[in-house]
Amino acid sequence: MDLKKKLIKLLEFRRELGEDYLIMPSWNEPEKVPVDKKATSREKVEFKSGVTGKADMKIEENENANNQAKSALEKHYQEIKDCQLCPLHETRHKFVYGIGNPQADLMFIGEAPGKDEDLRGVPFVGAAGGLFDKILKVVELSRDEIYIANILKCRPPKNRDPLPSEVSKCIPYLNRQIEIIKPRIICALGRVAAQNLLDTNLPLGRLRGEIHFFNRIPLVVTYHPAALLRNSNFKKPAWEDFKWIKQLCDNPGQITPYQPEPPKKLSLGL
Ligand code: SF4
């Protein structure tokens, strides 16, 4: 696809998300400091004259830390991939561990694998995963920068809500993933993930826009991409949430709540 067609598709998608106008960057933007591509977002390395040696050391440290986190996740996966702690192991096709950057600053957590995830063993694939990727792209994030996991690693039959007994058995696995990845911000996707992580019965509308905490890590809440597919009225508020989440990631020292916009029509069960 040529650049013009790509740009048109991107603008159409942004309009679908409810964005009525586009702010163009100023022509007088300050000159950007070049950043080495190998440096992770956790520790960007500025290259200025006379500090190249230090920068090389930082890159090496980052690579070592990244390899350690990757190995720790792999070891953890091997330890739990045949888990039979709850009855969901009997109906699963594939165990769905998680995917992404082992040192991601931003970690997304959903409730449980759906049909496509269960068949492929990868979280957030299928139509909802495709929409999630598109939203990430317009806020200039990619799957390489984030980590995605679910509270449950096996699919509940017919996508029913996870049972408390299943969550209590499975959540230690997620805790271990968080311990290894050490995200700066967690984003719970959907009511079920948010309520289980925050141990609350509050509806999703009351949880959006606030900074909560999970194991002392700031946690924010937005819609699950599958909910956006079911009800397009959620797209605009979700888009606003994602822009706020991106701002939080870009300015981790200034974590503040925002006033989220409610969807046009409230739908029960989300
Ligand atoms: S859902 Fe979690 S606890 Fe249950 S079998 Fe799967 S991995 Fe084990």
Image (tube, helix red, strand yellow):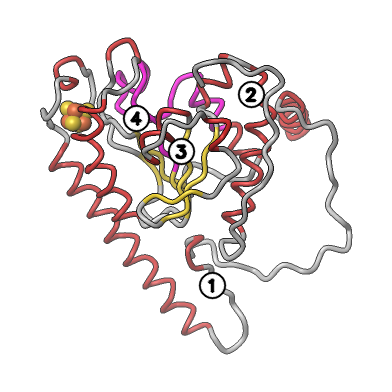
Q: How far apart in space, not on screen, are marks 3 and 4 (Cα)?
A: 18 Å
Question: Residue at 60% across / 31% down in the picture?
Answer: 134
Sequence-wise first label, 3 or 2: 3
**Tag of residue 188:** 3
Q: Position of residue 66 (x, y in %)?
A: 34, 60
Which residue matches tag 2?
A: 234
For this view, does 96 lie left or right of residue 197? left
Numbered-mark total: 4
Q: Which quadrant would residue 8 be assigned to in this image? A: top right
Q: Earlier in the sequence, mark 2 or mark 4?
A: 4
CB under 8 Å between discs 3 and 4: no
Residue kind at label 4, given as amino acid type: Val
Query: Which callout, 4 or 1, points at the residue further toward the start of the chain?
Result: 1
* Residue where numbered disc 4 is placed: 122
| Residue for point 54% across, 29% down | 223
* Image quarter in which the N terminus is found: top right
Outermost residue toward the right?
Answer: 27
Relative height, residue 203 to residue 91 (above, below): below
Image: magenta residue range? 108-133
User: How much space separates mark 4 and mark 1, taking CA atoms?
Assistant: 32 Å
Instruction: Residue 45: give its label.
Output: 1
Dot 2 crowding, Cα within 10 Å, few <14, some 14–19, many 20+: many
Mark 2 and mark 4 in contact? Answer it, CB < 8 Å. Answer: no
* Real-space Cα separation, disc 3 to disc 2, in angstroms: 16 Å
